[in-house]
């Protein structure tokens, strides 16, 4: 009875609404088979992401030339919603791949919610896994091959889980050790190792605490039922 109750609990996913925990665990187990990422750790990443901004993102891109947009909550102009370029003139940034991604999915790029910028840097992260467009396109082929689908959709939960799994694998989490997972979480959040950013280290610590809770209070009771 406890296992049934746990499976039925609603699990919040940023930009993807809510799904039963059992379904989220099924996604995580599928990803684990393809990438070697521990399900509890992967689920903790998504649980952490939902804590930073529940439900939908809160910005729209409105100007493809500058990357500016507006807040969905206030209608106020927001600069740096998405990067037109990041490093130099050869860096395509995120606007171009975002236009391609939304075009392939039949979405209106100027009315698709993405994350707003924080105190530094840009916004523009998409879907439950909060991938920026330029990173998402690097994983599209891996996602479609792993799931046997024609097109990868960052706003579809199954695709978002797989994308996060591949990124965490590339960040070194496949070994399954505490330090490797924590460092992979820090890189997922900021692109930097935990030792290089106290902000990222806090994120990594929180993810690892959530992973332990998910494993002992949710996954273990289901698997041992």
Image (cartoon, rainbow, N blue to C red):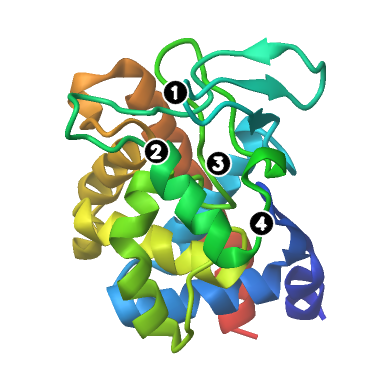
Dot placed on the residue nearer the N-terminal end, 3 or 1:
3
Q: CA distance from mark 3 to mark 1?
A: 20 Å
Residue hosting label 3: 48
**Mark 1 and mark 2 residues within 8 Å of each other at the beta carbon:** yes
- The residue located at (82%, 81%) in the rendering is 1
Q: CA distance from mark 4 to mark 2?
A: 16 Å
Q: Position of residue 37 (x, y in %)?
A: 33, 67
User: Which SS class for mark 4?
Assistant: loop
Residue 94 shows which numbered tag?
A: 2
Dot placed on the residue nearer the N-terminal end, 3 or 4:
3
Q: Is residue 103 left or right of residue 92?
A: right
Residue hosting label 1: 122
Q: CA distance from mark 3 to mark 2?
A: 24 Å
**Mark 3 and mark 4 residues within 8 Å of each other at the beta carbon:** no
User: Which SS class for mark 1?
Assistant: loop
Q: CA distance from mark 1 to mark 4?
A: 21 Å
């Amino acid at each position: 009875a406890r296992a049934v109750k746990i499976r039925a609990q609603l699990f919040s996913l940023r930009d993807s609404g809510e799904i039963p925990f059992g379904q989220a665990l099924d996604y995580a187990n599928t990803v684990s088979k393809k990438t070697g990422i521990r399900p509890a750790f992967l689920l903790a990443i998504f649980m952490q992401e939902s804590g930073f901004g529940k439900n939908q993102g809160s910005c729209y891109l409105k100007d493809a030339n500058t990357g500016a947009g507006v807040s969905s909550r206030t209608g106020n102009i927001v600069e740096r919603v998405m990067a037109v370029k990041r490093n130099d003139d050869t860096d395509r940034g995120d606007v171009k791949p975002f236009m391609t991604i939304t075009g392939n999915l039949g979405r209106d790029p100027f009315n698709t919610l993405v994350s707003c910028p924080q105190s530094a840097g840009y916004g523009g992260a998409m879907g439950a896994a909060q991938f920026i467009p330029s990173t998402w396109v690097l994983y599209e082929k891996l996602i479609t091959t792993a799931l046997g689908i024609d097109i990868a959709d960052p706003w579809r939960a199954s695709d978002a889980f797989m994308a996060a799994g591949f990124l965490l694998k590339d960040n070194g989490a496949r070994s399954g050790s505490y330090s490797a997972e924590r460092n992979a979480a820090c890189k997922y959040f900021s692109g930097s190792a935990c030792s290089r950013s106290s902000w990222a280290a806090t994120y990594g610590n929180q993810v690892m605490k959530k992973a332990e809770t998910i494993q002992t209070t949710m996954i273990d009771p289901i698997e041992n039922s």
